Amino acid sequence: MRVICMVFALLLLFSLATLGYGQYKGVCPGYCSNMCDKMDEWGFSRSCRKMYCCIPLPKKGK
């Protein structure tokens, strides 16, 4: 039982220490909006405050 608890605790600590997990990005590389388009990738950013950071997906080249 101790081994299982130690493994679980190590996995929990590792997941919390992973870079970028649960952290806000500083500057939005796209645009800030209350709603993003269907084709946009969305996330959060400090510069957008309570709005979404909408990042347009790159267009496919021919």
Image: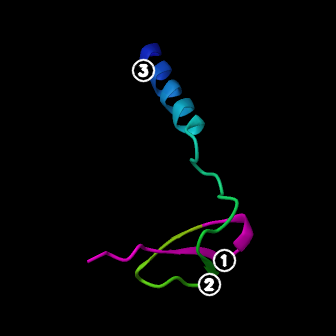
SS at badge 2? loop
Question: Residue 28: x and y, percent?
Answer: 64, 68
> Circles 2 and 1: CB distance less than 8 Å?
yes
* Left or right: 6 in relation to 29: left
Q: Residues within 10 Å of mark 3 (few under 14, many from 20)?
A: few
Question: Residue 41: x and y, percent?
Answer: 47, 71
* Left or right: 44 in relation to 57: right
Q: How is the image coloured?
A: rainbow
> Circles 1 and 3: CB distance less than 8 Å?
no
Give the alpha-carbon distance from disc 2 to disc 1, as whole Å: 5 Å
Q: Which numbered disc, 3 or 2, marks the residue that appears first in the sequence?
A: 3
Q: Foreground residue, 39 or 11?
A: 39
Q: Which mark is residue 38?
A: none
Give the alpha-carbon distance from disc 3 to disc 2, as whole Å: 44 Å
Report if residue 48 lies within the magenta region.
yes
SS at badge 3? helix
- Kind of residue at disc 1: Met
- Kind of residue at disc 2: Asn
The residue lying at 53 percent from left, 31 percent from top is: 14
Q: Which residues are magenta?
A: 44-62
Report if residue 52 lies within the magenta region.
yes
Residue identifier under label 1: 51
Residue identifier under label 2: 34
SS at badge 1? loop
Residue identifier under label 3: 4
The residue lying at 45 percent from left, 22 percent from top is: 7
Residue 51: quadrant of the picture: bottom right
Give the alpha-carbon distance from disc 1 to disc 3, as whole Å: 41 Å
The residue lying at 58 percent from left, 41 percent from top is: 19
Instruction: Please identify, in this view, whether the residue under mark 3 or under mark 2 is nearer the observer.
Output: 2
Q: How many marks?
A: 3
